[in-house]
Image (cartoon, grey):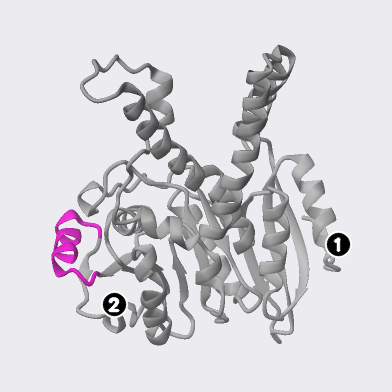
Amino acid sequence: MNVAVVGVGLIGGSIGLAARKRLGARVVGFDPDGGVGASALRRGAVEAVAASVPEAVAEAEIVFVAAPVSALPAALDAVLAAAPTDCAVSDVGSTKRAIVSGRVDPRFIGGHPLAGAETSGVEHARADLFEGATWYLTPGTATSGALYERLHKALVGIGAQPTAIDAAVHDRVMASVSHLPHVFANVLVAQAARALGDGADVPATGPSFRDATRVAGANATIWPDIYLSNSDALVALIDETQVRLAEVRAALAAADRSAIERWNDGARVDRDALLGAGLAGGSVHELRAAVTDRPGVVAEIALALGHAQISIVDMALSPSRDGGQGVVALWVRGEEQAQRAIELIEALKIPVARA
């Protein structure tokens, strides 16, 4: 397999290392910073460095665009202008609506791996960075089923767990579980610093404070663009948070112990439910869906299952000889998820059966 990586920092470099080690892929890299490209070559993240985007993607079967959020639209457009017609193109951006909007191209599948590190740069890249990590995919109505399958298999091959999700839903989810916690961490450290006052003896901080503020002051070259690219979802959540804080404040001011207990116990229940979601194992079941060969049909199935938090362990697309129809084979884990997947696929008016 020929893989191209445009932008070879921590994420792009880790993709390169994983693809070379686990897929046996030939990886060509490009980075606008020639020094970064040279470092990626020395690190073994790529086996060749191209002088331009067209050169990097000329023979690629999959291209991963790992540019910073602010540079991502232009980088994606350059890749799509040069990539072969049968090449899957994806990105790793942490917000998806602006990236997916307007890019009606059968080759493009938006992506976002939930993986990273406290450090940055290709020198910290790791082949195992994506092991067990959720990798969100945001296919569109025009997405090629064959190219989606190719990308899905490659991500499974490097240890990730690809899950289809609508771009708008993705951004709301990330605002809740990633972007808002970063805002809180910044606010908490600033508030604690001001509460202590200038010249005060700083007490030893406990694990709760350290855990809650671990991401405070995250990479300033990356995070302002992430906040701004998802600002409407983030502003809405901050407004909702202010309402919830006001409710807690009112209970504290009224010394309403019962309300405080309900609030605290509810948080524990919600946390257990969130952290336990999707962790159950179980046997793998094969489902076979008979589909017509039309744009977006594989994306429809993947998004329907992804919305229901049903992970596709693996998938294969077998077109008929005349190309008019085919079979999508899906493997999902657990009897309950398999039955739910059948119901969801049938609701799309697509015949499906167990293998």
Position of the N terminus by quadrant: bottom left
Q: As displayed, is residue 204 above or below residue 44?
A: above
Residue 167 visible to the viewer? yes
The alpha-carbon separation of the residues under discs 2 and 1 comes to 42 Å
Structural crowding at the residue carrying mark 1, measured as other residues with C-alpha within 10 Å and reported as few (<14), some (14–19) or many (≥20):
few
Q: Disc 2 marks which amino acid?
A: Ala
Instruction: Please name whichever residue, 294 or 224, is drawn nearer the observer in this view of the structure.
Output: 224
**Residue 24 image position (x, y, % from top left):** 35, 60
Residue carrying label 1: 347
- The disc, 2 or 1, on the residue closer to the chain's N-terminal end is 2
Residue carrying label 2: 56
Q: Decide if residue 82 is on the left or right side of residue 44.
A: right
What's the residue at 77%, 40% (across, down)?
A: 335
Q: Secondary structure at mark 1?
A: helix
Structural crowding at the residue carrying mark 2, measured as other residues with C-alpha within 10 Å and reported as few (<14), some (14–19) or many (≥20):
many
Q: Is residue 35 magenta?
A: yes
Q: Secondary structure at mark 2?
A: helix
Q: Magenta segment, which residues? A: 31-45
**Residue 165 image position (x, y, % from top left):** 63, 58
Instruction: Please name whichever residue, 241 or 281, is drawn nearer the observer in this view of the structure.
Output: 241
Q: As displayed, is residue 248 above or below residue 145?
A: above
**Residue 135 image position (x, y, % from top left):** 51, 53
